[in-house]
Image (cartoon, rainbow, N blue to C red):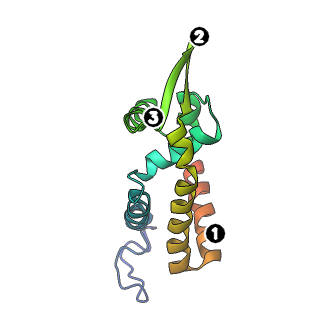
Amino acid sequence: MTRETIDTVDASVDNRYSACLLFSANALARVITAIGDEEFGRLGLAYSHAYLLREVVDQPGVTPTQLSNTLFLTPSTITRLIEKLEQKQLVERRAEGKNTKVFPTTKGEQLRDEVVAAWLRTWDRYAGAIGEEQAKTLTQQIFKAAQALGAV
């Protein structure tokens, strides 16, 4: 949104805030989060838990710091996610020298394919609504914008 467009309404969208990135990004985040919550909820997981579990299954022995860097979450958030997955007996922490490493349990490893399937269902719903090419492009643009703004 620029100073010139702040009072302009896009007639094709019929919303005075359609030119505002803050409004649009948050609206998109709410919708995508609801889809992710529904799809991953079938597994008894929040999508954030599923992302972390996938990383641990694919990289046994990953450190919380590495998870924090990969998932762009604070160390305290990573700790809470790990604790929740430990309660569900999907991961376990092991101290190795000065480092703590996170490993999947057998139960966690067995859930991997279902996590991937939930991810694909989420993508199918999103891409089905806006088109696969637009979904790919939008995803890349959002990630690049987040990088440029220092979020990732």
- The residue that appears at 41% across and 84% down in the rendered structure is 13
**Which label was assigned to residue 78?**
3
The secondary element bearing badge 3 is classed as helix
Residue 144 position within the rendered picture, expressed as x and y whole percent measured from the top left: 62, 55
Instruction: Say whether residue 101 is visible.
Output: yes
Give the residue at mark 2: 97
Task: Tell me the CA gap for discs 1 and 2.
Answer: 44 Å
Task: Tell me the CA gap for discs 2 and 3.
Answer: 20 Å
In the rendered view, does 45 fall on the left or right side of 102? left
Nearer to us: label 1 or label 3: 3
State yes or no: discs 1 and 3 in contact (Cβ < 8 Å): no
The secondary element bearing badge 1 is classed as helix
Residue 115 position within the rendered picture, expressed as x and y whole percent measured from the top left: 53, 54
- The residue that appears at 55% across and 62% down in the rendered structure is 117
State yes or no: discs 2 and 3 in contact (Cβ < 8 Å): no
Instruction: Say which amino acid is labelled 3.
Output: Ile
Q: Is residue 13 above or below residue 34?
A: below
Q: In this view, does 4 lie above or below 112?
A: below
Nearer to us: label 2 or label 3: 2
Mark nearer the N terminus (1 vs 3): 3
In the rendered view, does 83 fall on the left or right side of 117? left
The secondary element bearing badge 2 is classed as loop
Instruction: Say which amino acid is labelled 1.
Output: Thr
Residue 70 position within the rendered picture, expressed as x and y whole percent measured from the top left: 59, 40
Give the residue at mark 1: 137
- The residue that appears at 43% across and 89% down in the rendered structure is 12
Q: How crowded is mark 1: few (under 14 residues within 10 Å), some or many (20 or more)?
A: few
Residue lying furthest top in this view?
97
Task: Tell me the CA gap for discs 1 and 3.
Answer: 29 Å
Q: In which quarter of the image is the C terminus?
A: top right
Residue lying furthest bottom in this view?
12
